[in-house]
Image (cartoon, helix red, strand yellow):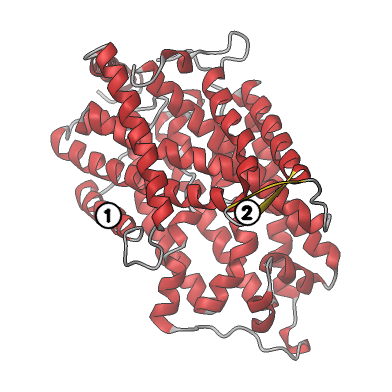
Amino acid sequence: MSGLKKSLGKLDIIALAFGAMVGWGWVVLAGGWVISAGIWGAILAFLLGGFAVILIGVTYAELAASMPLTGGEHTYTHRALGVHVSFICSWSILFGYLSVVAFEAVALPTVVEYFIPNYNQGLLWNVAGWDVYASWVAVGMLGSVLVTWLNIRGVAVSAWFQKLAVMGIMFVGVLLFLGAILYSPENSTAVQAPAFIGGIGGMMAVIVMVPFMFVGFDVIPQAAEEIDLTRPAIGKFLIISLVIAVLWYIGVAWSVGRTLPLIEAQNSTLATADAMTNAWGGKWAGILLVVGGVLGILSSWNAFLIGGSRLLYAMAQSHMLPSFLGKIHPKYNTPVNAILLIGGLATLAPLFGRKMLVWIVDAGGFGIVIAYTCVAISFLVLRYREPNMVRPFRVPAGKPIGFLTVILSMGLLVLYLPGMPSALAGIEWWIFLGWTVLGIALYGYATAKQPGKSKAFMDAEIEALKKHNIEWLKENNLM
């Protein structure tokens, strides 16, 4: 067990996971959902896609309750599949976390343009066809420094900020939904979105996007040692956060479809903000919703920085990466060097412009799905290899659920491959290859310098966890 401090309660972990899943995408993409599938087509797509993600989340819930150690996937995959797969899984999802944190540093200055038109001043250079301005870079860097500082101050401070941001998002979301209920489409001469558009094909176009709207629930296992809850509760609240996110996206899709005429949705750059303006009949409402979107950026940013830094810390502790990344702040009990590294990279991100960061996020998404697949396989392997493993939160019909989750996870992987509508572009494959080569080099260096130490460390951690689990059973009168 580490020196990290238990500071996260029920509301904290729901806010952490929900805030990670609900970033900026719901503000700009909801119009596209309705255009592609219609109102009820989009809702059904989120129900089906949400069900698939919840199944993946269920496997995480059982494993997180069984192995409440910092690093999450890092530990599960080692126990089931060995140290090498553990590194592959950890390095893959770390890339996803880094890409999201970096992208939020670009999303923030982009949103400022909604409030201050033509605020871009001081042209610096052009990256992949995108003009990078000094004022734009400054906003992104300032936001990154603030979020990094909050994380260094301690997970309790970060959690307080997270709850505040999520409360703001929820307030705006409820206002959007209430406005849609009170809205009278009959008063508009514009054509409203029909219930279904494009049949199954239209729904599939939305389902392709659905899993990636839910990336972020997995930050809960990363911070498991800082969660001050019973072990069964960790699994339960992870699933609760996913269910809340499914309901959120369904509510947003219905509200936008009801209040934003089809022609407006097709021409809108911020569809949800325009829907809010229509619902309440004033520009102030659209501005308020964009403020909610900014809070979504900050909450997602904060959550992924927490998750990424804890994973980096766990990898350093297990001798897979340089040991300085495992340093704990003497006052705040946070993995300070891991936070500074990820926060520092995010601070530099705005210098590369938006187009480059979109490529990195797409490539990083592939890494996240690789990790999901590794976890699903680990869940299934442990059900067969260790049927008597202590499972404080036990999934009913574990083996069938495991098989189904593995199939769904592999299905998500296929979406990135050539020939699919959401396949990675050539440059995105090169970025992913570069990250892979870097990982092989660092892992090769660490294992050559201290051969066998990583495996020995993690084996010892698992053995200590098994003993701790027996004590847990005795304390709860379960044996």
The answer, for residue 37, to whether it is visible in the render is yes
N-term-proximal mark, 2 vs 1: 2
Q: Secondary structure at mark 1?
A: helix
User: Which quadrant would the N terminus be assigned to in this image?
Assistant: top left
- The quadrant of the image that shows the C terminus is top left
Give the residue displayed 60% in from the left and 83% down from the top.
193
Q: With respect to residue 128, does 284 lie above or below?
A: below
User: In the image shown, does 226 or 107 lie closer to the viewer?
Assistant: 107
Quadrant in the rendering for residue 114: bottom right
Residue 45's spot in the image, x, y percent? 45, 69
Residue at 44%, 26% (x, y): give it.
312
Q: Is residue 332 above or below residue 404?
A: above
Residue 372 spot, x, y in % from top left: 34, 45
Q: Which residue is mark 1?
A: 410
- Furthest toward the bottom, the residue is 189
Q: Identity of the amino acid at label 1?
A: Met
Residue 296 seen anywhere in this rendered image of the structure: no
Outermost left residue: 385
Give, as a three-letter code, the residue at label 2. Answer: Trp
Report the side of 122 relative to 11 (left or right): right
For residue 357, side relative to residue 382 (left or right):
right
The residue that appears at 40% across and 39% down in the rendered structure is 93
Location of residue 379 with respect to 210 vertically, above or below: above
Q: What percent of the width, then of the height, locates residue 271?
A: 67, 69
The image position of residue 94, as x and y in percent, is 43, 35
Residue at 57 percent across and 71 percent down: it is 32
Q: Is 455 drawn above or below residue 385 in the view shown?
A: above
Q: Are marks 2 and 1 in contact (CB under 8 Å)?
A: no
Describe the element under mark 2 as helix, strand or loop. Answer: loop
Mark count: 2
Reading the image, the residue beneath label 2 is: 24
